[in-house]
Image (spheres, rainbow, N blue to C red):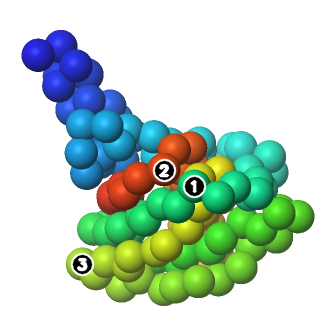
Amino acid sequence: MKLILFLFLLSLVSGCVPTSKQDISLTDVGCENIDTSRSKLNDYKVTINFINKNYPKANLFWIDFEGKEVLYNIIDKGEEAIQESYAYHSWVIRDESGNCLRVFLPNAEGAFQAVI
């Protein structure tokens, strides 16, 4: 029971909702850490369902191995985008003005939801 309560509270605080009891490894590392959030080589596949509940448009960027942002998708409010990726590949969400909203880092194999 304590584990379920912990997972629920973690999902509320982080905005990351695990899709199963085992998938609790999608971390919002925070915009203040974007400079150190470049992707790392890895073979563990992940699927992230980005859900935009709060912003008119959310721009989804992959942070490549050199720390450069590569636009992958624009998610309208109320829409979702399913992104195939790898563990330790970083993703940043920016608003229409380019302001950082969230920085996500999956650090385990699995399927995740990221509510923005």
Secondary structure found at label 3: loop
Which quadrant: the N terminus? top left
Mark yes or no: residue 77 visible: no
The tag on residue 71 is none
Tell which circle, 2 or 1, labels the residue nearer the N-terminal end: 1
Q: Is residue 7 left or right of residue 63?
A: left
Q: Position of residue 18 (x, y in %)?
A: 30, 46
Secondary structure found at label 1: loop
Nearer to me, 55 or 23: 23
Q: Position of residue 80 (x, y in %)?
A: 31, 77
Secondary structure found at label 2: loop
The tag on residue 44 is 1
Q: Is residue 55 left or right of residue 46?
A: left
Q: Amino acid at mark 1?
A: Tyr
Q: Position of residue 81 (x, y in %)?
A: 38, 79
Q: Which residue is mark 2?
A: 109
Q: Is residue 112 left or right of residue 102?
A: left
Residue in view at x 25 percent, y 51 percent: 19
Residue in view at x 83 percent, y 63 percent: 65
C-alpha span from label 2 to label 1: 5 Å
Q: Is residue 69 left or right of residue 61?
A: right
Residue in view at x 71 percent, y 43 percent: 33
Q: How many marks?
A: 3
Mark yes or no: residue 39 visible: yes
Q: Is residue 56 above or below residue 67?
A: below
Q: Is residue 82 above or below residue 88?
A: below
Residue in view at x 53 percent, y 78 percent: 59
Q: Is residue 49 above or below residue 34?
A: below
